[in-house]
Image: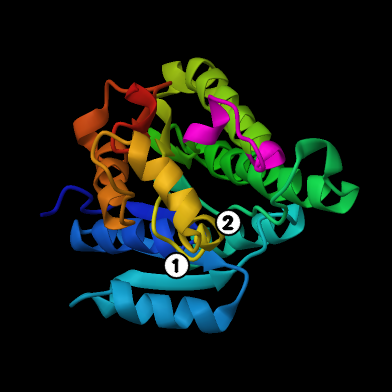
Amino acid sequence: MGRLDDKVVWVTGGSAGIGKAIAARCVAEGARVVLSSRKDDRLARAAAEVCGDRPDAVFTRACHCGEPSQIAATVAWIEQTVGSPDVLVNNAATNPYFGPLLKTPPSMWDKTFEVNVRGYFETTRAVVDRLLAAGRPGSVVNVASIQGSRAAPLQGVYGMTKAAVISMTRTLAVELGRAGIRVNAIAPGLVDTHFAKTLTASDDLVKLYTDRAALGRFATPDEIAGLAVYLASDESTYVTGQVFTIDGGYTAT
């Protein structure tokens, strides 16, 4: 306990799934945590679930991470209300199209890139600008996917955006390392979340995954959260530019 004492952590996409699990772990480790997602009602429910015995440590702010103006307003609000973020967890994502890559509707291509790539970039820039201005170290944790480093049939655009996140992670780690700002990524495999329901609701798709995964199953959100806490904490002060795969051994075979 106390691994994140005195730190302010901003978790995007924090109202459900992996983001909510990361937020709960960060609160338990002593951080003040800001949850953001698009809808206030979902944020309120999530805050009540993750706060534990520290209700005053959780803050919420609706923010559409596909809208740069909302990102700027949210970061300014966090700075004034909670304090400048020490840690950013980029988790907000979308995957509106499931089908052959060449059949992707242009509107869904644009939406996926706006949230999954531009959103990660703009939130990172807003937080890092403040860290650099204050001369403070910090940590950015990007939630990517194994789909960003391998073929992603039927999820091609989503996979492309996650490949971009991995590239962004490595480039920013090199550019920001001398300032003490670390940038790392987590690449989960299949996780039992509402976001992945298109996959987890299909017995055939689940079987394709679990038959190959060394552990023979998919993950729970909490199994991703522990690594995020490590990367957010001072235990990982010599770790940057890395992509950590958590996939139950799926990509090992």
Which residues lie in the magenta part?
146-158
Where does the image place residue 219, in percent across and percent down from the top left?
Answer: 31, 50
**Left or right placement of residue 224 versus residue 17 in this view:** left
Residue at disc 1, secondary structure: loop
**Residue 83 visible, this angle:** no
Q: Which residue is mark 1?
A: 16
| Dot label at residue 124 | none
Where does the image place residue 18, in percent across and percent down from the top left?
Answer: 40, 56
Q: Quadrant of the N terminus?
A: bottom left
Q: What's under tag 1, amino acid-wise? A: Ala
Name the foreground residue: 230 vs 144.
144
Where does the image place residue 36, in percent across and percent down from the top left?
Answer: 53, 65
Residue at 50%, 15% (x, y): give it: 174
Q: What's under tag 2, amino acid-wise? A: Val
* Quarter residue 214 falls in: top left
**Left or right placement of residue 109 versus residue 56 in this view:** right
Residue at 38%, 22% (x, y): give it: 240
* Quarter residue 29 falls in: bottom left
Q: Earlier in the sequence, mark 2 or mark 1?
A: 1
Q: Is residue 150 magenta?
A: yes
Residue at 75%, 57% (x, y): give it: 69
Q: Which residue is mark 2?
A: 75
Name the foreground residue: 153 vs 11.
153
Where does the image place residue 92, in percent across and percent down from the top left?
Answer: 56, 54
Q: Quadrant of the C terminus?
A: top left
- Alpha-carbon neighbours of circle 2 within 10 Å: few (<14), some, or many (≥20)? many
- Alpha-carbon neighbours of circle 1 within 10 Å: few (<14), some, or many (≥20)? many
Q: Nearer the viewer, mark 2 or mark 1?
A: 1
Name the foreground residue: 178 vs 118.
118
* Quarter residue 158 falls in: top right
Residue at 27%, 41% (x, y): give it: 227
Residue 188 lies, with reference to residue 96, above or below; the image says above
